[in-house]
């Protein structure tokens, strides 16, 4: 029997009749404020769960399903989120610093006021996500950021190499020391590191022959 307790009161929120929490289903569970720091939670189904203010510090959350879950105020610093699915999830004010989240999915997720410093989201799908927060030193290389809202976001030192920013919102975003090698910009064109966009070569008609 495993007991999941509240991080402050110590009260039992849920009892699980199992030897491990890995691959369990907590779909729709009410776990607000739970203490799950360092927990082994690989493959857990958290769909539609209330996970507000949960402490997931250093937890193993790879391949978890957080679709439509509410994680407002949660702390996930140092967690392993590789392959996790946060589609349509609410993550207002969440802390995700130094996390490993390569190939994860944050499509349509709401991460306004998020703290993502130093995290790895390489190859992730963050299209249409609300990312108006601190992404200082984030690895977003190869990420799908099409239509993402990065208005006012801090992207200082972030790696956006080969990321796709088509139709993303970057008004007032801080792009100091941001790496953009091979990045597709907001208008669907490759970013030119000299400050513009690479345009297709225009050749005279006779150069197409022979």
Image: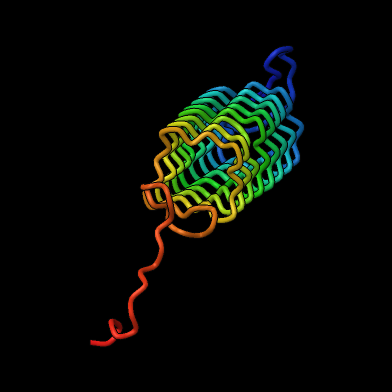
Residue shown at 65% from the left, 42% from the top: 130
* Residue 154 placement (x, y as % from top left): 54, 32
Instruction: Please say which color scheme the image uses.
Output: rainbow
Q: Quadrant of residue 26?
A: top right
| 124, 50: nearer the viewer | 124
Q: Position of residue 103 (x, y in %)?
A: 48, 47
Residue 77 visible within the image: yes
**Residue that appears at 54% across and 57% down:** 187
- Percent position (x, y) of residue 166? 54, 56
Between 169 and 99, the one lying in front of the other is 169
How many numbered markers are drawn?
A: 0
Q: Quadrant of the C terminus?
A: bottom left
Residue 25 in view of the camera: no
Outermost residue, left side? 210
In this picture, is 159 found above or below 116? Answer: below
Residue at 47% across / 59% down in the picture? 189
In percent of the image, x 43 and y 55: which residue is there? 197
Check the image and report above or below for 9 versus 202.
above
Left or right position of 35 against 125: right
| Image coords of residue 180 (percent x, y) | 41, 45
Quarter in which the N terminus is drawn: top right
């Amino acid at each position: 029997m495993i007991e999941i307790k509240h991080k402050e009161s110590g009260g039992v929120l849920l009892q699980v009749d199992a030897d491990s929490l890995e691959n369990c289903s907590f779909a729709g569970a009410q776990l607000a404020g739970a203490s799950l720091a360092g927990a082994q939670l690989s493959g857990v189904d958290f769909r539609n769960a209330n996970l507000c203010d949960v402490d997931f510090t250093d937890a193993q959350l790879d391949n978890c399903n957080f679709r439509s879950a509410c994680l407002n105020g949660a702390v996930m610093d140092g967690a392993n989120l590789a392959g996790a699915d946060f589609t349509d999830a609410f993550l207002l004010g969440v802390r995700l610093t130094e996390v490993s989240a390569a190939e994860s999915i944050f499509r349509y997720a709401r991460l306004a006021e998020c703290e993502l410093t130093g995290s790895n989201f390489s190859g992730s799908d963050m299209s249409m996500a609300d990312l108006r927060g601190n992404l200082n030193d984030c690895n977003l290389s190869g990420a799908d950021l099409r239509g993402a809202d990065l208005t006012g976001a801090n992207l200082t030192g972030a790696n956006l190499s080969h990321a796709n920013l088509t139709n993303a919102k970057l008004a007032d975003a801080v792009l100091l020391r941001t790496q953009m090698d091979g990045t597709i910009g907001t208008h669907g064109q490759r970013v030119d590191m000299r400050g513009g966009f690479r345009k297709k070569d225009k050749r005279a008609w006779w150069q197409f022959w022979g």
